[in-house]
Amino acid sequence: MSDNLSTSAVLHCENLAKTYAEGRMRTPVFDGLGLTVEQGETVAIVGASGAGKSTLLHLLGGLDVPTSGEVYVAGQKMSALTDAARGRLRNQSLGFVYQFHHLLPEFTALENVMMPVMLAGADVKAAAQRARALLDSVGLGHRVEHKPGELSGGERQRAAVARALVNQPACVLGDEPTGNLDEKTAANVFAQMLELNRAQKTSLVLVTHDRRLARKLDRVLELHEGKLRHLPHEQL
């Protein structure tokens, strides 16, 4: 375990670097980046397009491998785990919400939300019960048997939020989760996301271009020229 890692940290990275290579060309995204997210904390990451915000989120979620540096999820060093163990840790400790919902079109809302619980080894009845309760809490109790194609954009994102939270993860990583919605729907989905996060005491790391939404989180960081810097709320 890192000497810099607090016992209450759910997500931590240190000296994180990512460089993309194509032939002889090297494109560094960031180098020596550090971040700690405490239990129950909500953090927004803002910055210009192309600054590397989504890349950082993928590294924190173990969906990509850093060029150097370490990522710790729930106290476990990601680089020390096998691919299978990383997959289990992601399923148990992390939830993901993207700009596009990534719901499977052939399955109902209920079945989509059940999947992370089933992958964790729960039986069908327990998975369905937990998924149904979360869909109720995001106002989709009457839409559980509908497939994604039969849901509105806002309903699909609310189902995606329920899926991200169904395993009660330590942290949810959101990549522009309301970026594809109109302003009113985005505000509603975001409010429900925050309410569920706080009810479950789950941490949230949210990449967003919407500074009005970022202002509602505990801490705002700007990714600029490969470094994370604190951004006071009054500057948003």
Image (cartoon, rainbow, N blue to C red):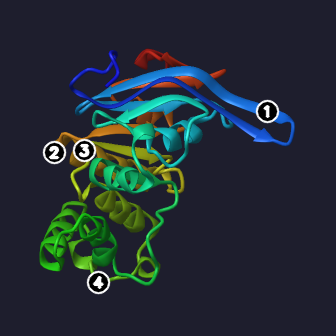
Element marked by disc 2:
helix
Question: Looking at the picture, how far across and down is residue 52, in whole percent?
Answer: 62, 35
The Cα atoms of the two marked residues, 1 and 3, are separated by 38 Å
Q: Amino acid at mark 1?
A: Arg
Element marked by disc 3:
helix
Residue occupied by mark 1:
26
Residue that extends furthest to the right in the rendered view of this protein? 24
Question: Looking at the picture, how far across and down is residue 160, in whole percent?
Answer: 37, 62
Residue occupied by mark 4:
145
Element marked by disc 1:
strand
Q: Quadrant of residue 103?
A: bottom left
Sequence-wise, the earlier of marks 2 and 4 is 4
Depth-wise, is mark 1 or mark 3 nearer the camera? 1
Residue occupied by mark 2:
199
Viewer-side residue, 69 vs 159: 69
- Please state, as top left, top right, bottom left or bottom right, where the N terminus lies in the image: top left
Q: Which mark is residue 63?
A: none
Sequence-wise, the earlier of marks 1 and 4 is 1
Give the number of marks. Answer: 4
Determine contact: label 3, label 4, CB under 8 Å: no
Sequence-wise, the earlier of marks 1 and 3 is 1
Sequence-wise, the earlier of marks 2 and 1 is 1
Relative height, residue 70 to residue 154 (above, below): above
Q: Quadrant of residue 117?
A: bottom left
Q: Is residue 207 visible?
A: yes
| 96 with respect to 169 (left or right) | right
Residue occupied by mark 3:
197
The Cα atoms of the two marked residues, 1 and 4, are separated by 48 Å
Q: Amino acid at mark 2?
A: Ala
